Image: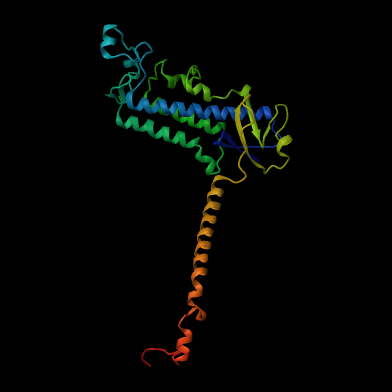
Amino acid sequence: MVKLHIKKGDDSQFLYETTVNILIDDLLRDLTAIFNGRLKVMRICAEMEELAKFGITLPPNMQGLTEEQVTDLKLVDEWAEKCTPSGGYKMKKDEIGRRNGRAPTDQMAEVIRKTVKEAKDLISKEKVKANVEVNQGSVKEALDMLRGAVMIVYPMGLPPHDPIRDEFENTEDLSGTQASLEVIDEASASLWWAGKEFIRGKKLMDFVGKNEKTKIVAKLQKRGQGAPGREPVVGEEEQKQMMAFYYRKQEEWKKMDADADDAYMDSAWADSKQLKRQFQGMKDIKWGPR
């Protein structure tokens, strides 16, 4: 299997395994699905961490308002009683006024936090260092774990305006957000390796050859951004090792130079009083007990 180390810019994303016979169109479809799926998992994890702290989101017309403003406008959160967390709740005010403050109990909150951590680990960038592939199955497993945790803590479900529910139902609206800039649409995706763009309609073997044991570092980006910077010939870790090696060598050379400068002082010919001792017959005299 060909192993692709996928990067976006200089940032490692995940490892992907495939065959040299795969069409570039199919490859880009898989890669963008995994890349965007990982983004979705991270967005859900971020929202679930807030869910564990402050409960469900308020209706859009109540978000950001103070308690006095809510009272004056006679607004009521009709979903607060319908979407009560399992085991009851404890009040913890959301200072930014986005969530209703009915947080799950510590036990239920721990279920959410533990699941979030496990989901992040499944699609983590650290998998690259561990030489473990991340695929669509990994993303689906992470999403299923998160969905299951929400069902455990909120058996009645989440309100229709909650972003977590939108993400699970694929109805999220990311327009106007930073998250929308990170998503790479399949139709506008491009993949580069060694300064060459993988052309749609061709196969992977047309670019990397027929060796199924090939491993390459490929960069995924949006079309029209130009060729990304090439990978350095020497990796970061190798560069650190080389710098450490040359530093040790430099220190050894300095020590050798210092030794060489002073070594002549120990030689017999460098003793300025040697001739005097010879005339006085005091050469090779040793002081001390027999």
Tell me: 119 left or right of 90: right
Tell me: 204 left or right of 286: right
Residue drawn at point x = 51 percent, y = 37 percent:
125
Between 270 and 152, which is closer to the camera in this rendering? 270
Tell me where residue 230 sits by quadrant. Answer: top right
Q: Is residue 9 visible?
A: yes
Residue drawn at point x = 28 percent, y = 22 percent:
93
- Residue 217 location, x and y as percent? 62, 39
- Residue 203 location, x and y as percent? 72, 32
In this picture, is 191 found above or below 242? above
Residue drawn at point x = 54 percent, y = 27 percent:
36
Say how many tags the image has.
Answer: 0
Quarter that holds the N terminus = top right
- Residue 179 location, x and y as percent? 49, 23
Between 210 and 237, which is closer to the camera in this rendering? 237
In this picture, is 62 found above or below 149? above
Q: Is residue 147 visible?
A: no
- Coloration mode: rainbow
- Residue 198 location, x and y as percent? 68, 31
Tell me where residue 9 sits by quadrant. Answer: top right
Tell me: 236 left or right of 112: right
Q: In this view, which residue lies farthest toward the top?
A: 73
Quarter that holds the C terminus = bottom left
